[in-house]
Amino acid sequence: MEEEKINNNEAIEEEQTASAPEGEKLFTQAELEAIINKRLARERAKEQKAAPAVSDEELTRRAAMLDCKEYVLNNGLSMDLLEILDTNNVETFKEKAERLQAINAAKRETKTEYPALKDAGEVRKINDESAQIRAAFARTTHKPKEYIKR
């Protein structure tokens, strides 16, 4: 950067001395440096505007998320863990995922036996009611009126 300044300063001085007719103002070294510094400041401002808006914090968060996703895929875990657990710290994520995996394995090993349900008469009652309803509609003696066509 300093070399560019020096080269620019020398080039500008040479141009001015070579092409300066009598009566024109020549710039001093301090004035040239001020002009160059202004131009460099403008260029730096343009570069900052053009720079991506992603911060270092955002990049580390994305990298941690990808590491957690890779861990889940390599260990055959559910992708839902990425939404449930915090993915900002990879080591904490791995510890919690391993604990959840251990809990699930323990649940699979111990099957809960539920006692057989006894019929408290509800099924029989429903069947009786539906039989009564069918019987009531089976003995209908009502015949619809025949309409007289005019």
Image (cartoon, rainbow, N blue to C red):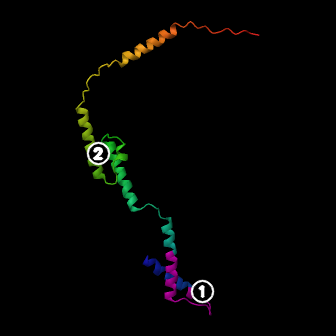
75 lies above or below 150? below
Q: Residue furthest right?
A: 150
The part of the chain drawn in magenta is 16-41
132 lies above or below 99? above
In the rendered structure, does residue 97 fall within the stretch colored magenta?
no
Q: Which mark is residue 19?
A: 1
Q: Which mark is residue 33?
A: none
In front: label 1 or label 2: 2
In the rendered structure, does residue 24 fall within the stretch colored magenta?
yes
Label 1: which secondary element: helix
Q: Position of residue 53 (x, y in %)?
A: 46, 62
Q: Give the spatial CA distance, label 1 vs label 2.
A: 75 Å
Q: Position of residue 96 (x, y in %)?
A: 28, 47
Residue at 51% x, 79% y is 38
9 lies above or below 72? below
Q: Viewer-proximal residue, 40 or 72?
A: 72
Q: Viewer-proximal residue, 58 or 131?
A: 131
Residue type at mark 1?
Ser
Q: Which mark is residue 97?
A: 2
